[in-house]
Amino acid sequence: MNWVQHAERLAGQVVRPESRWHSAVAAVPRHKFVPRWWESTGDGIWILRDGHSDPEAWLEAAYTNQTLVTRVDACHADRALPEDAGIAIDGTPTSSSTLPGLVVQMYRHAMVADDSTMMVTTGTGYGTALACARLGHDQVTSIDVDTGLVNIAKDRLALHGYRPQMAVCDVTGELPGTFDRIVATVSVRPVPASWLSALKPGGRLVTTIAGTGLILTADKTEDGGATGRIEWNRAGFMPTRHGDDYDHHADEVWQQAKETDGEEVTTSRYPLLYPPDSWDVMSMLALYEPGVTYQRQHSGDERTVWLLHPDGSWARATATGFLDSPTVHQSGTRRLWTTLERIRNRLNREGSLPAYGARVTITPDGVTTLKRGSWTFTL
């Protein structure tokens, strides 16, 4: 099976045939944008895969509806040599080729018209290629903070006849033009005011809130702000970065949280939860405690979950049985597990949490407020 057949099969899996995105997914050779990638072993270790070394596995990976991680910390798969295939590193993903179905979902939330001008984020360039295939490259601008990523993507796009405007810039800063649609496959908090300035009257932005699974869509209003909603479906993207790599403030906090008793020891009323396993709970926790990160560890029957905050606050919860109440140690100015318990109390009491489906109001300077029923939260 050649790549065209793979792409047509993928298109049939992620979008209906009558959609205008179907032909775009079927026409773009995703494997050419991801010649090498990092594959997770599930324990924090990443193995380098090289497509040319195993063409069959390359096509299978590229045309499966999955995210392919292309950069771990500052180690980009594109800068590796073919003979490096199989090497292992540990670290945090910092760039990827988003699963095609999610890219299309974000674009469909944008309600793109045939004459729309569109700004997207670059990454590998695959999402940019889809936008070009749908609209034509004259209507597409693609940006990224990483000069290397932009240059590589630009070359690969040109090889396939796509020549959108490409720019190296911080997506949270001034943007290179004005657009009918802005779609970011990176997460932000809050919505940058520069996006509102760059949106044309009646334009629409689509993004996710950093640390959450919340997709935010909003249309520009006459006063220069925007109104919209938090969509019901979920998505998570890497947050924006402003340099070569992310800061890893929580690493030092984790080392402390592994070994010390903390300032407060309690017993939780609920079974142990790793928040990323529950998108609703994780999203609410990230709203109230921005910057929180998570770790977990299994040792025999014992399971431990850590909540870590860059300001030095942490919580560690440990349990043996799946229904046992964990012992919780906490330290710092924030009681992270206490906040988590309050969210779970609300979920237990009301049967749902209010973030998904919330109405969104954004002021011209980017102040973003979510509201659903009596619940209101300002980022």
Image: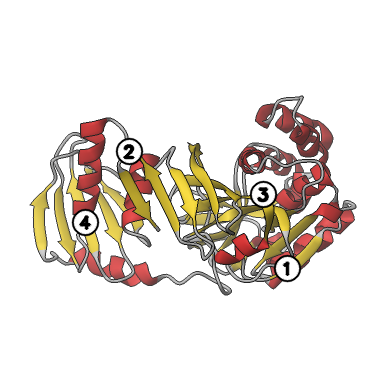
| Three-letter amino acid code at the position of disc 3 | Gly
Q: Are marks 4 and 2 in contact (CB under 8 Å)?
A: no
All told, the count of numbered labels is 4
Dot 2 alpha-carbon crowd within 10 angstroms: few under 14, some 14 to 19, many 20 or more? some
Please state which of residues 13 and 357 is positioned toward the viewer in this rendering: 357
Question: Which callout, 4 or 2, points to the residue nearer the camera?
Answer: 2
Gap between marks 1 and 4 measured at Cα: 45 Å
x 33%, y 43%: residue: 281
Q: Is residue 326 above or below residue 177?
A: above
Q: Which residue has dot 4 on it?
A: 316
Q: Which residue is mark 2?
A: 353
Residue located 26% across and 36% down the image: 347
Image coordinates of residue 377 in percent, x first then y, are 35, 52
Q: Amino acid at mark 4?
A: Arg
Sequence-wise, the earlier of marks 3 and 2 is: 3
Residue 155 visible: yes
Q: Is residue 40 left or right of residue 55?
A: left
Which comes sooner in the sequence, label 1 or label 4?
1
Q: Amino acid at mark 2?
A: Leu
Instruction: Say if mark 3 contacts mark 2, CB within 8 Å.
Output: no
At which x and y percent is residue 310? 34, 69
Instruction: First in sequence, mark 4 or 2: give its number.
Output: 4
- Give the residue number, with chain letter if any, for mark 1: 176
Q: Quadrant of the C terminus?
A: bottom left
Mark 4–mark 2 distance (CA, rounded to whole Å): 24 Å
The percent position of residue 257, horizontal first and vertical second, equals: 23, 65
Report the disc number at residue 202.
Answer: 3
Gap between marks 1 and 3, in whole Å? Answer: 19 Å
Looking at marks 1 and 3 on the same chain, the residue that comes earlier in the sequence is marked by 1
